[in-house]
Amino acid sequence: DAKTTQPPSMDCAEGRAANLPCNHSTISGNEYVYWYRQIHSQGPQYIIHGLKNNETNEMASLIITEDRKSSTLILPHATLRDTAVYYCIVRVADNNAGNMLTFGGGTRLMVKP
Amino acid sequence: DTGVSQDPRHKITKRGQNVTFRCDPISEHNRLYWYRQTLGQGPEFLTYFQNEAQLEKSRLLSDRFSAERPKGSFSTLEIQRTEQGDSAMYLCASSPRAPYNEQFFGPGTRLTVL
């Protein structure tokens, strides 16, 4: 799986959009970008994933650059409960593979009042 | 609640003792994963089951570790002769077969080896 690079920490004001960047310059054509987050003392939580098109769900939006070498997770209106470590993971989604997740260091997002 | 459950949530043991953790996945998920997470680090993959078959094991899974998933339902992770370095959060996740395999994690079992 391709390696990802994320800033170690970010701050965001409550109610504002949180934009979390991720670089994955060695991504392959069949690799998806997945985002998970981990709130303190809980297991990781799936947020969103995409291949090349921008994606949106009830939690967040995922913007992938045209060359697919980077992406941004957007939390449109951050709340204090969004304070967590956010992990960007690149991997193949293949029914014949194990599809284990390779977590990096992630970005620690602190939402402040 | 139909999420992934793990038991116990916390375990304190003395070095050299054996411990066993249980994971109950989401019922229709045929894939089950174990991860380990030490303080300040992201989770690291340990092993993976598809139904009852253990298909992959990480090099992190030493001979003292064994995992089972009888009948393809719940899974157990046993650590024999625990060492202080085994202290960590042990996370279980499950996923459906297709198509994108997003994984749903349990709350974890925090192991402290004294």
Image: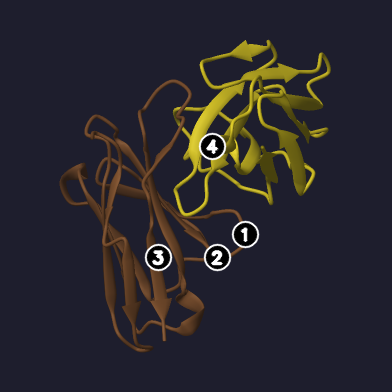
Name the disc covering residue B38, or none. 2
Tell me the crowding category of disc 4: few under 14, some 14 to 19, or many 20 or more residues within 10 angstroms, Cα based. Answer: few
The C terminus of chain B lies in quadrant: bottom left
First-in-chain label (3 vs 1)? 1
Q: Residues within 10 Å of mark 1 (few under 14, many from 20)?
A: few
Residue bearing mark 4: A81
Q: Which residue is mark 1?
A: B41
Q: Amino acid at mark 2?
A: Thr
Q: Secondary structure at mark 4?
A: helix
Q: Secondary structure at mark 2?
A: loop
Q: What chain is tagged by disc 4? A: A
The residue that appears at 57% across and 65% down in the rendered structure is B39
The chain coloured brown carries which letter?
B
The vertical placement of B90 against A67, above or below, is below
| Distance of label 1 from label 2 (alpha carbons) | 6 Å
Q: Amino acid at mark 4?
A: Arg
What's the CA distance linking mark 2 and mark 3? 10 Å
Are discs 1 and 2 less than 8 Å apart at CB? yes
Same chain shared by disc 1 and disc 2: yes
Query: Hey, which residue is sitting farthest top in the picture?
Result: A53
Residue drawn at x 62%, y 59% as measured from the top left? B41
Earlier along the polypeptide chain: callout 2 or callout 3?
A: 2
Query: Quick check: can you spot residue B79?
Result: no
The residue identified by callout 3 is B110
Task: Indicate left or right for A41 with A17 as reference.
Answer: left
| Marks 2 & 4, CB-CB < 8 Å contact | no
